[in-house]
Image (spheres, coloured by chain):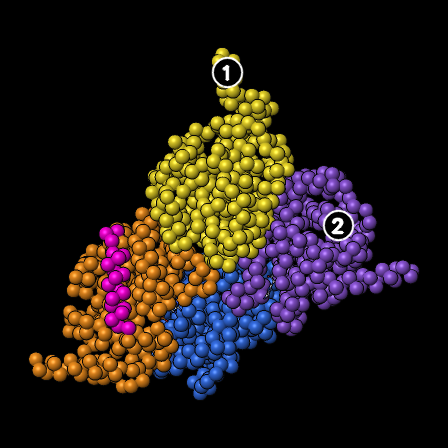
Chain colours: A purple, B blue, C orange, D yellow
């Protein structure tokens, strides 16, 4: 008890003092894996992960075949804090898929012309046609989290967005688009650890934008915005899936399973697909509770 | 009475026998102006029309100025049967406006890629940005009238469209786009007269597409589809305006007045704008009654 | 002689004193029609013009048919000083053509993204596909005349453009695109008269951009740039046509005839098309002499 | 001598009998690495490769910085037979770069609209703007190799293309675009080995398109087309680089070095960049000799 109180104080101090330019406090590093009430303490075996990933990627190829031949349209939206692992997860989805049928859309901040249009307009331009899978690395949900937290939009724009987004998505879904929305969730210490690592690695440092660097200071604001977003936009036909993502391997397998398990593609191997691990793959509403 | 009965029989015969390749029956020609219960019998003076049009076009220039400086967005949708006068009306709107701020969008039938997308997607791409006026010469409403009547879409696609369109338009309007929807309505004999004239005029014959040529035979089906469309998509914030258009001059002035009268642009000359003639410019719901 | 010397002095004074805000000097007005060595003094009859125009427009419809069925591609570039009549001429070309096959491209000044691209890139995006006619109201030649004269580009950009443009156009022509380049040429007094009229007419005043208003002061610079442009870009396969355009009616008929006379469309009525009036429709090189 | 004669006969038989559905002949497998006169027999150490790759990727990040800040434009075209390793090489280039500044363009076969346009038009749409790097995974050179060999275009279209391409590229280069053209070259046995492996691997089998499967039978036709392409389009300012690519690791390092070594980006570490291995990175003309 006492000692845990000490630990907590030490952690609070370390969090307050965090800077990518300083060495990472040991207390942050040691708590990262379990941060944010992550339910596991043990790491999965890499070999096993690789085997499972490979099998799931073979399923993704069958899915792609089905999308092409049944002329389906799939949209998968990835959201999450900086360093939550969006890019890496998307990479595992698309790694062996055919770039002619699977597109990753990562839009830059809006140009002047785009800012002068209907907010959804530039995203609509990237929706899939029949036979395509489109993965959004960040999406229209910028207006729910990044933009208000960073002050890139006015509060009423977020309010209006949260009003419109269920209606917008319902139209897509009614039109036959299969929409998945995945929030990758990490704990506070894990975010700091990853930001710190990125800063140290010359191959990753560029990923640290000003938005990222201010993320730790906005931890609470982002949590609040995330919850409001899920609250407003989680519906029966357009649900959010929250994937606890402190462990990248588990998160990737979980996200892929979540998508595969919902789709009636031909030749699905249910032994491989299985059920997404309920300890880390949560329905949006359940996550909020 | 008797004679009117005779006339009616003669008219019925003439309508049934109509062909662009035959001379136009006198009874059609003589009844054209008053057809479809058109409320006027006298023609307006061309000189007066030209004077009023010119004054209204000066108002449109002020409107354009306002749209630019207040960074407004305006969408004006024109629908109506073939030969109702959509093109000519649009031309009077844009005649003296700056093509860099005012666009006319007349989309061809969807390409393969477009057919494979969300139905609204190709229209969304043409929505105005701030500072622009966009006029649609036919629009997403193809799915409500032309497509079902011509058999270009399945009935459930029209049903779904009529479900979605109020939601879609509400999003645009909530986003600040000012949306006008104008149906130009002509009587049956007037349509035949105009189609006949087009066919005779080598400069206009090309306008007679197969869709047009089948229009007379589908008169009733189009009326039904039009009514269902207005019924489903006339809402308080996205109302339809029906303009009785047997007389082109009155229709053009009426349509321009209708738009100008709704918009708070700087320097509006209310003496010029006045009130759209209630005998021919009708609220969608009132038209249905 | 003497009196002509007086006149010339009076004219020089009037030209120097010209302002759209002052009444137009009588000497400018009276000399406008004949300015720039325009070869005619009499005006054509409007009725005859209308008859000929109509007949030529019927030919244009045949041309359009041919373009569609033979899957041809046509590009017509219109250049000329402000108020030379580009817009009006283009309007007579397209007036009765089908907007689904004939496009008018009038690009705004380049956006930031466009300025950061290959200069020709944004124009290439608008080139016709088979079956289309595209009319450019101003074109890539902005870099030869407007941009250097107004200081919107660096001199070496114009030099490079003049180097590249024959090569660029040769590629298009070798690819089967039929390219016409028409410079509408007006005299100095005629330009002033038209600018003055525009300024007085509320329906046309907006057309007077800052670029236009500075045009009179840059008369000589534009002449020089025009000549350098023609010199550098008139080749056997991509010739310039200069149309003397003080008289709008003659200019329109001449430009349409010029295009029709070159094209082997089916059903050409050579009596109607005839030969463009050699007094006002000049080959680019001949104009320079 | 004799035995080598035997070997050759055995190889010829194996080549003729090749099918992805049969086990791979041992003679093909054993000769793959050295096929096509590949100059090495030993494999590089993976650890060393990884270290060098990492260092070069850090250089690529500096390059990206320079491209952004100096507003440069870079185009890297990758061509080569099926299974030559284009995708994998591109992946190593972009792996740690920012997708907002680096685009990979892999165009599908032309749509109907695209086929009806200027051949280069759809490629021009993807050229970089200032601050961007664009990598083409196959490019306009389809018309030089894939299309004629597969019969997707007429011979005179290839002839015309080879005429135009130096002119087209010169325009880009004169405009300031830095253009690299890399042909990855593999030996015949290596191609068969890789195609065979792909076919066996469920994660890669989809990559085997009909075009790929017919590649072995068209080995000679492709060699001829490649040589004609290099002959026609290798110029001083738009040279081809041929990278002998039987060894993927060496090929990737070689291609990256080739690009880095040509560009004056800030902070270049010449010890890392070094000189591309002249045994496998060849100037196009030298390759032909
Ligand atoms: N000024 C801005 N206005 C609106 N959105 C912005 C602005 N600046 C950045 N963004 C958006 O914020 C998101 C997060 O930015 P950043 O952390 O730099 O990128 P990422 O995390 O995707 O690598 C991106 O989607 C970016 O487009
Ligand atoms: N096969 C089709 N599928 C869907 N829409 C079509 C089809 N053919 C024509 N249309 C649409 O029907 C409308 C009416 O066609 P038409 O009468 O030819 O043109 P307009 O009346 O606009 O000149 C147009 O908007 C056209 O795009
Ligand atoms: N800052 C600028 N940079 C480059 N081009 C410009 C700039 N401003 C105007 N232009 C171009 O100069 C041309 C002449 O402009 P303007 O006289 O305003 O239009 P127009 O004569 O076509 O009505 C147009 O093509 C316009 O796009
Ligand atoms: N019918 C076709 N016409 C033109 N190019 C094609 C056609 N089919 C395939 N290609 C191109 O050939 C190249 C190799 O095809 P693949 O190996 O199938 O990816 C790609 O760049 C394709 O776009």
Q: Looking at this view, is B12 or B31 the one in front?
A: B31
Count of all numbered marks drawn on residues in the image = 2
Horizontal placement of C51 versus B242: left or right? left
Q: Residue furthest bottom?
A: B271
In the rendered structure, which segment of residues is drawn in magenta? C218-237
Query: CA–CA distance between discs 1 and 2?
Result: 56 Å
Q: Looking at this view, is D128 or B225 the one in front?
A: D128
**Which residue is rendered at x = 19% and y = 74% of the image?**
C35
Q: Quadrant of ligand 3?
A: bottom left
Q: Chain of mark 1?
A: D
Horizontal placement of C184 versus A132: left or right? left
Q: Are marks 1 and 2 on the same chain?
A: no
**Which residue is rendered at x = 50% and y = 68% of the image?**
B128
Q: Is residue C235 magenta?
A: yes
The image quadrant of residue B208 is bottom left
Image position of A51 with respect to D263: above or below? above
Residue that carries the numbered disc 1 in the rendered image: D4
Assign a secondary structure to mark 2: loop
Assign a secondary structure to mark 1: helix
**Which residue is rendered at x = 72% and y = 38% of the image?**
A51
- The nearer-to-camera label among 1 and 2 is 1
Horizontal placement of A72 versus C125: left or right? right
Residue A182 position, x and y percent, is: 69, 55
Residue that carries the numbered disc 2 in the rendered image: A247
Look at the magenta stretch and give its main secondary structure. helix
Image position of B228 with respect to D123: above or below? below
């Amino acid at each position: 008890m006492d000692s845990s109180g000490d630990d907590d104080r030490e952690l609070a101090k370390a969090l307050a003092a965090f800077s990518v330019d300083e060495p990472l406090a040991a207390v942050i590093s040691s708590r990262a894996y379990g941060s944010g009430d992550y339910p596991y303490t043990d790491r999965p075996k890499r070999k096993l992960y690789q085997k499972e990933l490979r099998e799931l990627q073979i399923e993704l190829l069958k899915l792609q075949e089905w999308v092409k031949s049944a002329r389906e349209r799939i949209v998968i939206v990835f959201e999450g804090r900086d360093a939550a692992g969006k890019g890496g997860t998307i990479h595992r989805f698309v790694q062996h898929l055919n770039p002619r049928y699977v597109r990753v859309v990562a839009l830059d901040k809006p140009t002047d012309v785009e800012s002068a249009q209907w907010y959804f307009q530039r995203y609509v331009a990237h929706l899939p046609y029949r036979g395509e899978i489109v993965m959004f690395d960040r999406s229209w949900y910028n207006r729910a989290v990044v933009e208000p937290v960073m002050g890139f939009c006015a509060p009423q724009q977020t309010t209006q967005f949260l009003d419109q987004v269920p209606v917008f998505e319902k139209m897509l879904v009614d039109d036959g688009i299969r929409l998945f929305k995945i929030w990758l969730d990490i704990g506070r210490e894990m975010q700091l650890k990853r930001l710190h690592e990125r800063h140290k690695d010359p191959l990753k440092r560029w990923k640290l934008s000003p938005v990222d660097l201010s993320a730790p200071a906005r931890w609470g604001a982002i949590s609040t915005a995330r919850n409001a977003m899920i609250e407003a936009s989680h519906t029966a036909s357009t649900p959010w899936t929250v994937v606890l993502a402190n462990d990248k391997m588990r998160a990737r397998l979980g996200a892929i399973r979540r998508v595969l398990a919902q789709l009636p593609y031909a030749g699905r191997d249910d032994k491989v697909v299985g059920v997404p691990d309920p300890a880390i793959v949560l329905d949006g509403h359940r996550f909020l509770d």
